[in-house]
């Protein structure tokens, strides 16, 4: 749970530069998606913190649970790729930020963690229906975040974005 708490906090505090770039380009649908996602992430921060405080009684700093690779991803790579958008709003920078955030953080790490929660619930059958804030329930909502990623390929310069992402050769 400490890793989920730290991950939710990281995403909540690091996502704003991407929202700002999307908004500055007038991509209203993506701006709405990202701002609602940011709101949900903030709710998850509150939920996990309350669960850790009130259920587990873990009021201390939980940083000692963070592994070196976790620290590298959440404390270095995620903020670096998203904060880069403050000075570089190019398509390539947006792709790096989106891949780091949507595909690696949400699509791989969060989905893997939530899969573990779902498997645990299935095997234990502890409750007929988990509470609305239970990680397995949160997982169902969050899976749409990694599936519907913000992609510069929806913009008018989508051919350039596909080329930068390696899906098209420059001479095509």
Image: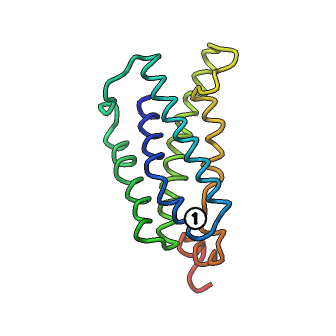
Residue 38 location (% of width, % of height): 55, 47
* Whether residue 34 is situated above or below residue 114 in the rendered picture: below
Residue 118 location (% of width, % of height): 61, 27
The one of 146 and 133 positioned closer to us in this rendering: 133
Residue in the image at 57% along x and 79% along y:
169
The one of 103 and 84 positioned closer to us in this rendering: 84
Write down the quadrant of residue 141 in the picture. Answer: top right
Q: In this view, which residue lies farthest toward the top?
A: 126
Q: Is residue 36 left or right of residue 52?
A: right
Quarter placement of the C terminus: bottom right
Write down the quadrant of residue 56 in the picture. Answer: top left
* Whether residue 93 is situated above or below residue 141 in the rendered picture: below
Residue in the image at 43% along x and 48% along y:
13
Write down the quadrant of residue 29 in the picture. Answer: bottom right
Residue 35 location (% of width, % of height): 59, 52
Q: In this view, which residue lies farthest toward the bottom?
A: 171
| Dot 1 alpha-carbon crowd within 10 angstroms: few under 14, some 14 to 19, many 20 or more | some
**Mark 1 element type:** helix
The one of 101 and 61 positioned closer to us in this rendering: 61
Report which residue position mark 1 lands on.
23
Residue in the image at 61% along x and 41% along y:
142
* Whether residue 134 is situated above or below residue 79 in the rendered picture: above
Quarter placement of the N terminus: top left
The one of 108 and 2 positioned closer to us in this rendering: 2
Residue in the image at 45% along x and 18% along y:
54
* Whether residue 134 is situated above or below residue 165 in the rendered picture: above
Q: Is residue 5 left or right of residue 120?
A: left
């Amino acid at each position: 749970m400490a890793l989920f708490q730290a991950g939710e906090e990281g995403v909540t505090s690091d996502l704003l530069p991407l929202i700002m770039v999307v908004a500055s380009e007038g991509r209203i649908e993506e701006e709405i998606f990202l701002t609602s996602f940011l709101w949900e992430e903030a709710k998850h921060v509150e939920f996990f913190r309350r669960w850790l405080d009130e259920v587990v009684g873990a009021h201390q700093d939980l940083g000692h649970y963070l592994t070196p690779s976790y620290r590298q991803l959440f404390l270095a790579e995620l903020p670096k790729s998203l904060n880069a958008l403050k000075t570089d709003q190019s398509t390539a920078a947006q792709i790096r930020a989106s891949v780091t955030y949507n595909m690696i953080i949400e699509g791989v790490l969060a989905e893997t963690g939530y899969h573990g929660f779902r498997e645990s619930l299935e095997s234990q059958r502890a409750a007929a229906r988990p509470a609305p804030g239970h990680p397995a329930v949160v997982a169902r909502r969050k899976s749409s975040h990694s599936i519907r990623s913000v992609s510069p390929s929806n913009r008018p310069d989508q051919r350039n974005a596909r080329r930068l992402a390696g899906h098209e050769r420059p001479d095509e």
